[in-house]
Image (cartoon, helix red, strand yellow):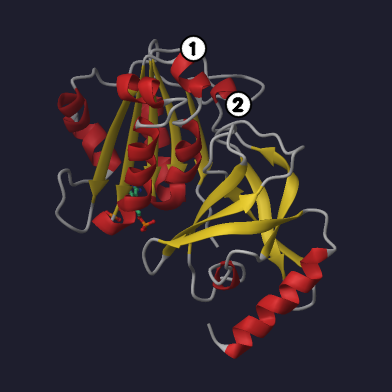
Amino acid sequence: MSALSIASNIKINEQLLSNPESQIVTNVVHWTDTLFSFRLSRDNNFRFRSGEFVMIGLPDETGKPLLRAYSIASPNWDEELEFYSIKVPDGPLTSRLQKIVPGDRVIVKSKSVGTLVTDALLPGENLWMIATGTGVAPFASLIRDPDVYERFNKIILVHTCRKNAQLVYGSRIVDNARTDPLVGDMVQDKLIYYPTTTAEPSLKQGRPTTLIESGEIFLDLNLSPWNAAIDRVMICGSLAMNKDVVALCEQQGLSEGSNNTPGEFVVEKAFVD
Ligand code: A2P
């Protein structure tokens, strides 16, 4: 890190020391040149439902908080909070957030919200989670929540990225979940992980939309095409991907749910700077 960015980090941390909504960075992992995850201390009073997002950020040059919506990637029983982010070179927040190191402080607002929650879905058999890019973050939380396994018989996590390296964060979460003392047995029993790439060879190539439309994914997994009676779908990715998967859900007769009126699918935009 340059002397200039160290000085700017020190300034930010001084400003945040007096902010009761700031939390301490405990760990940072850079997965690729454009993706990183970080862990923060968690306020004892902070409660959230798996799949929700919260506003987090840093002060800007004038000291005003610069906040963005980030899905919480850690399960709700974790003592800390984890987030997964892209690095946008000129992004107002991520250009600075990517420089955080353990001991720094980050603002975490006290209220979490969102629709990628099991409460917004009607009971069903199969829970499909369709993610592209950093859209895997809310599912990283949900696949470690025992409540999800109590409500559904099969949980299918579909994660699509251009390259294999961009899938590593998600695959590590899945691997660790399989041996987790709390949820490991349920994960082994019920979670199906289906990673795909679109710009590089891998075990499975293709956009989720193409694999769903062609029926390939259902053949691969020995499952029937989506049926409103038993299938529930959660979608989190780019606007274009969300729109296309919503159309596929609607074609199959699934209707959108919300916290007030649970339905057969729910959708949320992954963080974009
Ligand atoms: P593709 O490489 O075919 O565009 P991005 O890096 O742009 O956020 O994309 C992440 C992943 O989401 C890529 O694998 C990309 O595939 C895929 N993707 C982008 N748009 C759509 C869409 N409308 N439907 C399905 N997958 C999409």
Q: Earlier in the sequence, mark 1 or mark 2?
A: 1
SS for callout 2: loop
Q: Which residue is painted at 44% across and 25% down in the image? A: 183
Quickly name the residue at label 2: 258
Q: x%, y% of residue 174?
A: 35, 38
Asked whether mark 2 and ligand 1 are closer than 8 Å, the reply comes as no
* Relative side of 194 to 230, left or right: left
Residue furthest to the bottom: 3
Looking at the rendered structure, the kind of residue marked 2 is Ser
Looking at the image, which is closer to me, 133 or 229? 133
Which of the two residues, 49 or 129, is positioned nearer the viewer here? 49
| Residue at the image point whose x is 56% and y is 28% from the top | 117
| Neighbour tally class for label 1: few under 14, some 14-19, many 20 plus, Cα within 10 Å | some
Residue 238 in view: no
Q: Residue under label 1, please give it.
A: 123
In percent of the image, x 51 and y 61: which residue is there?
Answer: 28
> Does residue 119 sit above or below 167 in this rendering?
above
Above or below: residue 191 compared with residue 83: above
